Amino acid sequence: MSQRLVQRVMVMLSLLLMAVGTSLSAQAAPASKAPKSTKSAAAPARSVNKAPVRKSRAKASKRKRASAGKAEADDTRLRSNSVLVVDRDSGELVALKNPDTVLPIASLTKLMTGLVVLDAGLPLDEMLEIGPDDVDTERHTHSRLVVGSQLRRDELLLLALMSSENRAAKALGRHYPGGRAAFIAQMNEKARALGMSSTHFADTAGLSNGSRSTARDLQYLIRAAHAQPLMRRYSTQPEAEVTVKGRSLTFVNSNRLVRSTGGDWKIDLQKTGFTNEAGRCLVMQATVLGRRLMMVFLDSNGTMTRYADAARVRRQLELQAKIGKPVKARESVLAAGAAS
C-alpha cells in the first residue's frame, strides 16, 4: 500500500514538472523572438535614413566641383578695364580688353617724360633744384624732395621712373630749354612720331586728367622706352639712396613685382600709375616662357588687381604650354591674332 502511494506521488510529481516546463517554454518563446523582430524592424529604418545622406553628399560633391570649375573659369577673366598684351617679337596678340578706350594714364606719363629728357641730350650730371612750382597743388601728393633740394638730372630721372616721384618729374620739365610748356609740347610731338594717335599729354608727372592714352597706343611707348638702356635700368631698380639736403634718403620701386625677392618675374621695363580717375595702371615688358611680352593694364580697381591680371595672363600661357594647345578662355582674355 505504501509502495503504491509512493509510485503515485512520483507520477504526479513527474506530471507537475512537465506542466511547469511547458509553461516556461511558452513564456520564453516570445522573448527569444523579440530580438529578431526588433532587428527586422530596425533594418528598414536604417535603409530609409541612408538614402537622403547619400543624396545630400552627392549634391555637396557636385556643388563643390561646380564651384571649383567656376573659380577656374573666372580666374581667366581680367579685372582691369582696359588690357593689351602682345608678343613683342611675333606681334601675336595674347590678351585684349577694350584696347582703344581713351583713359587717364596717371604716372605712366613719366615714361614719355624720361624719353624727352634723354632725347634732349641734356647733361645728366647737371644739378637741378626743386622749386615751388614743382609742388603738387592739384592733388597735394606728398614728396620727400623738399623745396630747395638739389639733385643731379639723372637722379631726378631715376626717382621719377623708379618710385614715381612727382616733384622729380615736374622739375625735369621745368629745367628743359623753353620751360615746362616747351617740354610738354615735345612730349606730344614724340607721341605723334611714335604713332600714338589717341594720346595727349598735359603735364610731365601724370597728375592731370588731361594726360590720356589707350592700351593700344601705350605698346608703342613701351617699345620706345625699352630701346633706352637707362630707362630699362632705372625703371626696374628695386631701390636707391639719394642725398637730400645732407640727409641720405632711401626710395623704393613703386612696382611690387620688381621688389619681390621670389624672382617670379623677369621684368625689363615697367611703370605704375594711380589717380582716382585713372585707377591703378601698370605697363611692363616682361619675359614669360622665353617670350617678350608688352603688357598694359589700365583702370584697375583695387591695389592688387593689375598685378593679379599680369599673373593670370602668365598662368594661362604656362597652362597653354603644358597642354600643348590654346587655352579656352572667356571674354577674349587669351586670343590668337595679330596686333594692329
Image (spheres, rainbow, N blue to C red):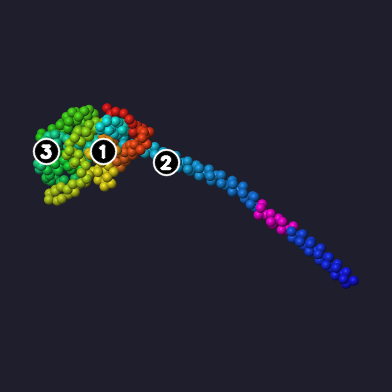
Which mark, by number, is residue 68?
2
* Picture coordinates of residue 190, whole percent (x, y): 17, 30
Magenta region's main secondary structure? Answer: helix
Instruction: Identify the image quadrant of the C terminus.
Output: top left
Q: Give the amino acid at mark 2.
A: Ala
Tell us which disc is closer to us: 3 or 2.
2
Badge 3 crowding class, 10 Å Cα cut-off, few under 14, some 14 to 19, many 20 or more, is: some
Disc 1: which residue: 286
The boundaries of the magenta stretch are 26-37
Quarter of the picture containing the N terminus is: bottom right
Q: Name the residue under label 3.
A: 175
Quarter of the view holding residue 10:
bottom right
In this rendered view, identify the residue nearer to me: 5 or 106: 5
At x 88%, y 72%, the residue is: 2
Q: In which quarter of the image is residue 121?
A: top left
Label 2 crowd bin: few (<14), some (14–19), many (20+), radius 10 Å: few
Q: Where is residue 171 in the image (x, y as percent from the top left)?
A: 14, 40
For badge 1, the amino acid type reads: Ala
| Residue 33 among magenta residues | yes
In the image, 269: left or right of 46? Answer: left
- What is the three-letter code of the residue carrying label 3? His
